[in-house]
Image (spheres, helix red, strand yellow):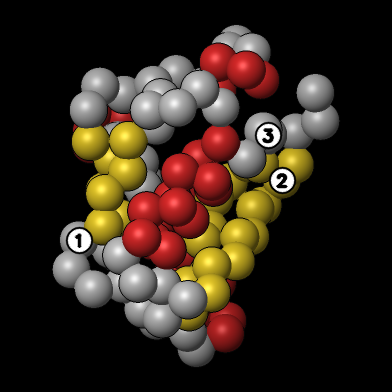
Amino acid sequence: MPTHPLRRRARGFDHADRLAAALAARTGLPVAHCLIRVGAPTRQAGSSRWARRAPGRIDVRVRGDPPREVVLVDDVHTTGATFAACASALRRAGAYTVCAVAYARALS
């Protein structure tokens, strides 16, 4: 899952990228940095389920040609809004299979 560039600069690292790298090391699968967040960063914490899933809230773009089969990696799965935005962008760009893996699941 792509972290917005402003959030990455503020944190000093990309948490999802670190998780993807660890998963890649264990599985031998490559990491493809083909998604980017654009627009203003959105804060998910404290937002309602409806607000998180509102159309256009999370703007994700695909760089280049995505792999045909993709595994999205994120730290926490809450409403699935970020996964849905990324999967939609990847499918529009030509990815055939998009799966999601999260380190934790937040129940609301």
Locate residue 14 relative to residue 69 in the image: left or right.
left
Q: In terms of image quadrants, where is residue 32?
A: bottom left
Q: Which of marks 2 and 1 is in front?
A: 1
Q: Which residue is drawn at 18% across and 68% down?
A: 64
Q: SS of the residue at dot 3?
A: loop
Q: Name the residue under label 3.
A: 78
Q: Name the residue under label 2.
A: 104
Q: Residue at x 60, y 66 (%)?
A: 99
Residue type at tag 2: Ala
Residue type at tag 1: Arg
Image coordinates of residue 85 in percent, x first then y, are: 46, 43
Q: In terms of image quadrants, where is residue 93?
A: bottom left
Q: Which of marks 3 and 2 is nearer the N terminus?
A: 3
Q: In terms of image quadrants, where is residue 50?
A: top right
Q: Nearer the viewer, mark 3 or mark 1?
A: 1
Q: SS of the residue at dot 2?
A: strand
**Residue 45 appears in the figure:** no
58 above or below 25? above
Q: Residues within 10 Å of mark 2 (few under 14, many from 20)?
A: few
Q: Which part of the image, by quadrant, shows the C terminus?
A: top right
Residue type at tag 3: Thr
**Residue at the outermost left position:** 64
Q: Mark 1 points at which residue?
A: 63
